[in-house]
Image: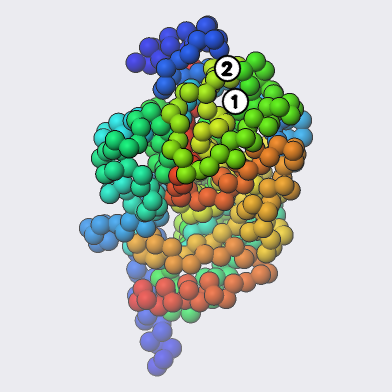
Amino acid sequence: MKTAAACCLAVIAGTAASAAPAPGDWVSIPGGTFKSALRYEDLPAGSRVAPYALLQSPVTNGEYLEFVRAHPEWRRDRVPVALAEARYLSHWQSAASPGPGTMTDQPVTWVSWFAASAYCEAQGARLPNWQEWEFAAAADATRTDARADPAWRERILAWYSRPSNEPLPRTGASPANVYGVRDLHGLVWEWVDDSSALLVSADDREQGSADRQRFCGAGALSMDDRDNYAILMRVAMLSSLGAADATGNLGFRCARDEL
Amino acid sequence: MKRAFQLVVACIAIALPVVANAGDAAHTPLPADSVYQVDATLSRAGGGETAWRALRGTPRVVTMFYSTCRAVCPMIVESARAVQRGVPAADRSRVGFVLLTMDPSRDTPPALAAVQRERHLDPATWLLLRPDEADVRTLAAILGVRYRALADGEFNHTTTLVLLDADGRVLARTEKIGSARDPEFIEAVRTAAAMAR
């Protein structure tokens, strides 16, 4: 199984971005030096992102159903509220079925951080950390870092003007970026492993201001690139959530260390 | 007479297995909103391992720290100790205090044992625990602690004391530490201690 996955990865890496891997496929990302849109006081020159692999698209309702079948403790009628709030999988018709209205290949949403982590762990993987997510999401179809391009930013921001009451598109429908990864922008928000590491200020020596540092108001303060609204909004959203929280436009994909 | 009575109560209290008591609580289902819904195994400062879930059975004040921290963490320990002092002596041993390290690579059990010794944290009520690397973020998540490892080995983190009832439900939390005391939190701990009689 592991060998098969490794072969798969090698094929993907070999054929580069032009090949369109099927949903659930892993995409190799070489990593490299990266300057986050967030201001990390301890990393003024940027950080080194190690090679990793990312799921080509976010996890779908269909894939998540398989997980729930194999791990019934994650059914919405069995999961403890400490690990997933009451609205967990509330868009499914029943605890054991998304139902006909929810397309199997739409990204799963209404999942908590605990649930997303458990899903990835069950695949022998993990959630990507923020740096890994941001690294992959900086790319467009031809460039590894398109972030300075105003046209690219506009395209991403256009997503936010789309009404949120429309059904979610299926995964994998958007063009792949230069690595072969899809849907990093324009489909759903995504959990990262270290969501709870976002936006913590230098430390809590400034008593009383902890809350201000932790939530939306701190977003601009910690952003190195204040024009990158798409990243700013994402960070503000992730940093405002608790690990048992779920929302209708927040999904996830898994990552793993490169083999 | 009153003093003698208090002494007896104190003795009984000391005899209570506050530190690692799975006890009868293990037989009833864990509440859905219990932090002990997280599955994790921790190393004890004194050696050996404790299941996170085995902390059930006693009200506890839990916080996260790391021992190489110069600025905030000593304050966290002192704040937790101040909370403990806020509980009447007769009830003091009814509430356990748990310090979880967010830095398992450096805070090995011997390192934690050194902290326990140097800071005179009575092993009868104070547990210093080291989660596995893979469980730190999960335990922080269930406790509502946010942190990030910095390039120089320090951590950014929120300073939170969480009061749990015997079943691991959050009764109160405070982010006020150091000189900024939180009387409401101390009152909640007092009440939890009194209810554990």
Name the chain under label 1.
A
At 66% from the left edge and 19% from the top edge, which residue is drawn?
A144
Residue B175 drawn at (x, y percent): 59, 62
Which image quadrant: the N terminus of chain A? top left
Residue B69 versus residue A185 in the image, above or below: below
Q: Amino acid at mark 1?
A: Ala
State yes or no: discs 1 and 2 in contact (Cβ < 8 Å). yes
Residue A13 versus residue A96 in the image, above or below: above
Residue that protrudes farthest toward the left in the picture:
B27
Circle 1 crowding by C-alpha within 10 Å: few under 14, some 14–19, many from 20: many
Mark 2 lies on residue: A179
Front-most of A143 and A123? A143
Circle 2 crowding by C-alpha within 10 Å: few under 14, some 14–19, many from 20: many
At 41% from the left edge and 43% from the top edge, which residue is drawn?
A111
At 61% from the left edge and 28% from the top edge, which residue is drawn?
A137
Q: Choose the circle earlier in sequence order: 1 or 2.
A: 1
Q: Amino acid at mark 2?
A: Tyr
Using the rendered image of the protein, determine whether residue B51 is visible from the camera's viewpoint: no
> In the picture provided, is A229 more to the left or to the right than A76?
right
Front-most of A250 and B85? A250
Asked which colour scheme the image uses, the reply is rainbow
CA gap between label 1 and label 2 equals: 8 Å
Residue that protrudes farthest toward the bottom in the picture:
B1
Quarter of image, res A31: top right
Residue B102 drawn at (x, y percent): 55, 46
* Residue A136's disc number: 1
Quarter of image, res B35: bottom left
Residue A233 drawn at (x, y percent): 63, 43
Front-most of B142 and B101? B142
Residue A188 drawn at (x, y percent): 51, 36
Name the chain under label 2.
A
Q: Secondary structure at mark 2?
A: loop
